[in-house]
Image (tube, grey):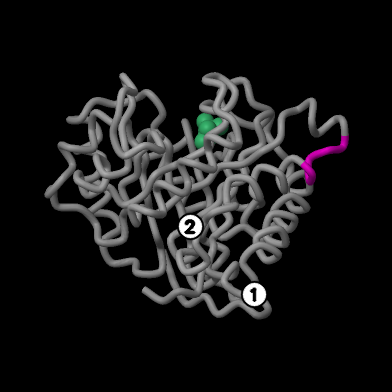
């Protein structure tokens, strides 16, 4: 797989606190049957910690990354209930999601803590899926761009330049996430996606082009194509609409069908 993010479509699901090991295994097996030969499609799932060990060694699609939903920044220590980067690496986990809105706003995670986690993940060669997004209140106050820039700049302060090809960013406005979330219009999110890309470019220069920027927040079969067509996203990060394989498949299909038509400056060759 090449390093050009524009030649790929990234598509993943955060399972949150859902699914047993057996259920996740079945999901992965079915994915294998459906998506094995799609090299320009990068899939990922982020199941609960309890599934990670059991997924080790199972037959899975080559283009599927398995991710963890969180981790602690320390290698080990007196942190009851926490899991470290070396523990995740030991299980063959491909990536770790950090800074999800539910971690920030339900569990009080701060930008500084996320920075330490991002650094620890990089030190352990784990791919990082960094989630950023403003609250409804921050958006109403007109501070969306400031919030996004601050979350990115703090989280990535110590992220090594040479590891940008192991970084993904998901823009997930807090007001759009989950069952109570409000569906965003593409015009709501396009400026944020652009701002995230500009901020990454300021931080990493040319290397920023290696970083896929995804959108997440109440993505569904009916709205996903508009997000992909009308914004500069490199992929989608989906919650509840993709927890069942039929949903996963339908959203992915709806999101990608139109990409078979080449866009200006777009060298996509992949099909689905
Ligand atoms: P949702 O979840 O698609 O159910 O809104 C997205 C997320 O929280 O990552």
- The secondary structure making up most of the magenta span is helix
- Residue placed at 18% from the left, 37% from the top? 53
Magenta stretch in the rendered image: 142-146
Instruction: Indicate the secondary structure of the residue bearing disc 2.
Output: strand
Instruction: Indicate the secondary structure of the residue bearing disc 1.
Output: loop
Judged by depth in the image, the label closer to the viewer, 1 or 2, is 2
Q: Is mark 2 within 8 Å of ligand 1?
A: no
The x, y position of residue 265, in whole percent, is 65, 80
Camera-side residue: 264 or 88?
A: 88
Residue named by callout 2: 167
The x, y position of residue 8, in whole percent, is 47, 67
State the count of labels. Answer: 2
Residue named by callout 1: 263
Label 1 or label 2, whichever comes before in sequence order:
2
The x, y position of residue 193, in whole percent, is 69, 54
Q: Quadrant of the N terminus?
A: bottom left
Q: Is mark 1 within 8 Å of ligand 1?
A: no
Q: Would you say residue 143 sits in the magenta stretch?
A: yes
Q: Would you say residue 62 sits in the magenta stretch?
A: no
- Residue placed at 54% from the left, 63% from the top? 211
Camera-side residue: 98 or 247?
A: 98
Instruction: Locate residue 77: give its quadrant.
Output: top left
Alpha carbon separation for disc pair 1 and 2: 25 Å
Q: Is residue 247 left or right of residue 85?
A: right
Q: Is residue 229 above or below residue 40?
A: above
The x, y position of residue 221, in whole percent, is 54, 42
- Residue placed at 41% from the left, 69% from the top? 40
């Amino acid at each position: 797989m090449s390093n050009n993010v524009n030649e790929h479509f990234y598509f993943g699901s955060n399972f949150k606190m859902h699914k047993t090991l057996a259920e996740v295994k079945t999901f992965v097996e079915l994915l294998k049957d459906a998506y094995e030969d799609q090299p320009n499609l990068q899939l990922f799932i982020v199941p609960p910690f309890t599934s990670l060990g059991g997924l080790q060694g199972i037959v899975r699609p080559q283009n599927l990354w398995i991710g963890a939903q969180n981790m602690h920044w320390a290698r080990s220590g007196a942190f009851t209930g926490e899991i470290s980067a070396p523990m995740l690496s030991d299980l063959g986990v491909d990536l770790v999601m950090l800074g999800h809105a539910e971690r920030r706003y339900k569990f009080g995670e701060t930008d500084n803590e996320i920075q330490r986690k991002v650094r620890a993940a990089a030190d352990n060669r784990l791919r990082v899926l960094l989630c950023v997004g403003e609250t409804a209140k921050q958006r109403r106050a007109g501070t969306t761009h400031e919030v996004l820039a601050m979350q990115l700049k703090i989280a990535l302060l110590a992220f090594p330049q040479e590891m940008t090809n192991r970084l993904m960013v998901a823009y997930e406005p807090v007001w759009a996430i989950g069952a109570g979330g409000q569906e965003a219009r593409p015009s709501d999110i396009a400026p944020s996606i652009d701002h995230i890309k500009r901020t990454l470019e300021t931080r990493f220069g040319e290397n920023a082009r290696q970083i896929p920027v995804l959108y997440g927040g109440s993505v569904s079969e009916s709205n996903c194509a508009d997000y992909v067509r009308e914004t500069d996203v490199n992929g989608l990060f989906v919650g509840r609409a993709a927890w069942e394989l039929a949903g996963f498949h339908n959203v992915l299909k709806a999101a990608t069908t139109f990409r078979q038509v080449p866009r200006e400056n777009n060298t996509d060759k992949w099909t689905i």
